[in-house]
Amino acid sequence: QVQLVESGGGLVQPGGSLRLSCATSGSRFDSYIMGWYRQAPGKQRELVAAITNPGSTNYVESVKGRFTISRVENTVYLQMNSLQPEDTAVYYCNAFDVYRSFNYWGQGTQVTVSS
């Protein structure tokens, strides 16, 4: 059974940093595209960053230069720097099985940027 467990969220002041972690288990994720999504109150869930197994990455425009996604063995990270209030959201880890076109989701972790 595929499981994704996020950690690392919290409250941070504007300009601060956080690192989110997503521990994966239950499958080989070599062929999965791993990603981080976020959902702010009253808004749709949006893709923040994604990474393929060879390490190709892409980011939503609003986080380019501030966020970095990486994967080390069975863990996916999202390093978030220069955080702004508009980054406040619940962040979700996602694993997309490209062969079955199926998404797996973590439970989400809250990130709040406020002074």
Image (spheres, rainbow, N blue to C red):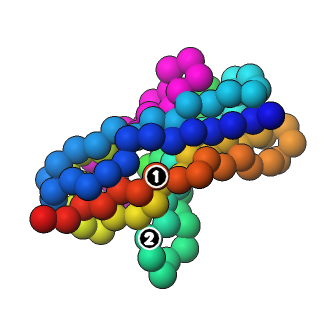
User: Pointer 2: what residue?
Assistant: 40
Q: Quick one: SS at disc 2?
A: loop
Quarter holding the N terminus is: top right
x%, y% of residue 92? 54, 52
Q: Quick one: SS at disc 1?
A: strand
Residue 38 visible from this viewpoint:
yes
- The foreground one among 47 and 12 is 12
> Which residue is at a point 52% across and 63% down the rendered structure image?
46
Q: Is residue 4 magenta?
A: no
Image quadrant in which you'd find residue 88: bottom left
Q: Report the side of 56 relative to 95 (left or right).
A: left
Lower position in the chain sequence, tag 1 or tag 2: 2
x%, y% of residue 45? 55, 67
User: Pointer 1: what residue?
Assistant: 109
> Which residue is at a point 74% across and 49% down the rendered structure image?
103
Above or below, 84 relative to 18: below
- The foreground one among 101 and 18 is 18
Q: Which amino acid does the dot numbered 2 rest on?
A: Ala
Q: Report the side of 43 relative to 25 (left or right).
A: left
- The foreground one among 62 and 93 is 93
Q: Which amino acid does the dot numbered 1 rest on?
A: Thr
Question: Which contiguous range is marked in magenta?
Answer: 60-79
- Quick one: which residue is furthest to the top in this view? 73
Above or below, 42 relative to 24: below
- Quick one: which residue is furthest to the bottom in this view? 42
x%, y% of residue 12? 21, 53
